[in-house]
Amino acid sequence: MGATGVRQKRVLVFGGSTVFCAEVPDSMTIPSQLQKIILDNKFDIDVLNYGIPGIRIENQFQILETIQDLGPGDTVVFYDGINDLNTVFRLGLESNKSVIPLGFVKEVAAWVESHSLLARGLISGYIDSSGISKNFLSTDAENEVADLWVKNDEAAREYVESKGASFVHILQPNWVTYQGGVEATKDNKRWSDMKTIQNYFEKYSTPVTKIENFTKKLDGLTSTPYIDWAHLDEIGNKKIAEEMFSVLEPLLVAQGK
């Protein structure tokens, strides 16, 4: 909302359902609130919402490659981590199929793929009690994060910069990173497994990799902004948009208003 489609400079925001933001009015999505902040700060820049429910970083990269006119004056933002975390979690469940029948795992996986509210795909008490093997969590999970997430970050960054555009990658927050959620979920096998995997995403979100870590950006709010374990209300979206602008502003200034 607020984008004209004719401004020469653009911020293209990629992500899953948390960028698409079906849970709030269009004016309250992260891209829409970012657009308002950018215009309020006198930047003549369009913000475009490339959020699609359920997609992961590799899908974002594939869609990015279809944009024919990407170039100088463009800033690409990848805001992700939740769908990628969910993918690694599901791989862990499948690796533990001696405990959880593979057919059941595939049934859950198919359900998750067809829904945007990811929390609904993980409600089985059977999964809660069985969880993921210690071997997967200690070694394989980190390797999967590196292969599925970090390598796509590196490829997308190289591609964007080869076009003369700027690239910003942000690790998004979720319920297991939120200070209120950490305490509430620490004794639950499902959530503790997800937190272990989440830690690997945070490990790779450093100044060295140039991946921004937003996992604690919502902790200062007076009440929880979470609608479910992944999606935010308008207050949470506004806070993320403000933090996103603080990262983008130096790049936008360098481009000129």
Image (spheres, helix red, strand yellow):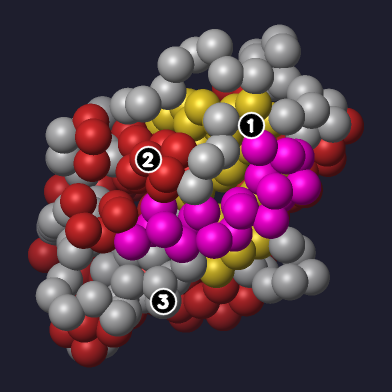
Quarter of the image with the C terminus in it: top right
The kind of secondary structure element at disc 2 is: helix
Kind of element beneath mark 1: helix
Residue 184 percent location from the top left of the image: 17, 84
The amino acid on which the numbered mark 2 sits, given as a three-letter code, is Lys
Residue most extreme to the right? 162
Above or below, comparing residue 92 to residue 102 in the picture: below
Residue 168 place in picture, x, y as percent: 65, 49
Residue tagged 2:
36
Decide if residue 181 is on the left or right side of residue 54: left
Residue at the extreme front:
42
How many angstroms separate mark 2 from mark 1 (CA)? 26 Å
User: What residue is shown at x 51% (from left), y 54% (from top)?
Assistant: 245
Alpha carbons under labels 1 and 3: distance apart: 26 Å
In this picture, residue 68 sits left or right of residue 58: right
Quarter of image, res 75: top right
Which disc is residue 212 wearing?
Answer: none
Q: Identify the magenta region.
A: 239-257
Mark nearer the viewer, 3 or 2: 2
